[in-house]
Image (tube, rainbow, N blue to C red):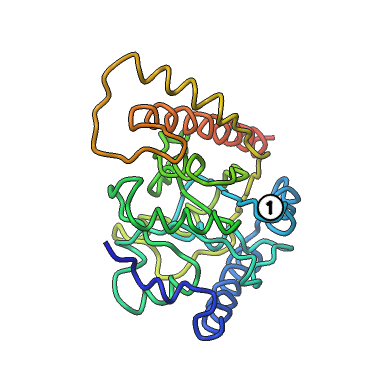
Amino acid sequence: MSRTMEWAARAEHLGGIPRKIVISAVGAFAKTVASLLNNTSVHNADTLLRLVRSRPPGVPLITVSNHMSTLDDPVMWGFKGFPIFDAKLARWVLAAEDICFKNAVYSYIFRVGKCIPITRGGGIYQEHMNEALERLNDGEWLHTFPEGKVCQEDEPIRRLKWGTASLIVRAPITPIVLPIVHHGFHEVMPEKFMFGRRPPIPLCNKKINIFVGDPIEFDLPAMSQMAIAQSRNGPFPSIGWPSTSDGLDEAAQRCLYTKISEQIHAAMERLRCFGKSFLKS
């Protein structure tokens, strides 16, 4: 499987000018929606800003968040003080291929804007997941929505897909993983606004709250050994995954990705509950 317009995603494409134009335009849109048309509050923003601007050289960052609307990214980065116009610091993000890459024009814009197309249901070893891994290898920042789809109901964090966990395990340098939970984007861009469709433009005068957690710690060597032991206790269905660089077979990977996803889920759910209590106070 070839990579969709990979050439447009390269930093050196046309001297980086298209990327700067797209990042600036998208940044202006995000800042307008988040900071001018609506009221956005960010709790523990300093942690996010510090990790985006000045984490150790070569160490990648993965931010994970719930997914409440099609505007979550980029609008969640449009709050005051965030370097949203800096094309070098801008996040890479996993984006649904069937929504963001419908045609050549969309594909070019999203590719220049540091989006990586993901085929939902395509599995953790699809070609563009390998591209995401390459960005982590470069020490970049990657944002993911591990729930896998938009959910606008006020309910607990849903079961997470394994894609994020697989990237954490497969990256040569373990990424810093930062959980984020937000509330209010479902009012800015409701899925069923009129005649069962989204509004043509973002709604205004809404309250957006973004809650940034603390980095999640993973003891990957210990977790890997536990996964190997657990994988020996029963049969696991096989679909032909390759072994990891440190020798984990498919059964062990399934156990390990489950444990890591559960840890991320628990951190996000605690943050969601904190945010809910905060909003009631």
Residue 26 shown left or right of residue 213 in the figure: left
Name the residue nearer the viewer: 259 or 34: 259
Location of residue 188 in the rendering, given as x and y in whole percent from the top left corner: 50, 59
Pick the residue in front: 69 or 193.
69
Question: Residue at 35% of width from left, 55% of height from top?
Answer: 192
137 to the left or right of 251? right
Q: Quadrant of the C terminus?
A: top right
The residue at 40%/53% (across/down) is: 129
Q: Quadrant of residue 85?
A: bottom right
Q: Is residue 276 above or below residue 101?
A: above
In this orientation, which residue lies closer to the viewer: 194 or 111?
111
Q: Give the x, y percent position of residue 72.
A: 51, 57
Of the residues shown, which amino acid type is indicated by label 1?
Ser
- Identified at 44% across, 23% down, the residue is 227
How many numbered marks appear?
Answer: 1
173 to 257, vertically: above or below: below
Residue that label 1 marks:
41
Above/below status of 243 relative to 229: below
Residue at image coords 59%, 32%: 218
Q: Residue 65 at x, y = what percent?
A: 53, 46
Q: Quadrant of the N terminus?
A: bottom left
The residue sitting at the top extreme is: 233
- Tell me if mark 1 has few (under 14), some (14-19) or many (20+) residues whose alpha carbon lies within 10 angstroms of its own: some
Q: Secondary structure at mark 1?
A: strand
Where is residue 163? Give x, y as percent.
41, 44
Horizontal relation, residue 125 to residue 69: left or right: left
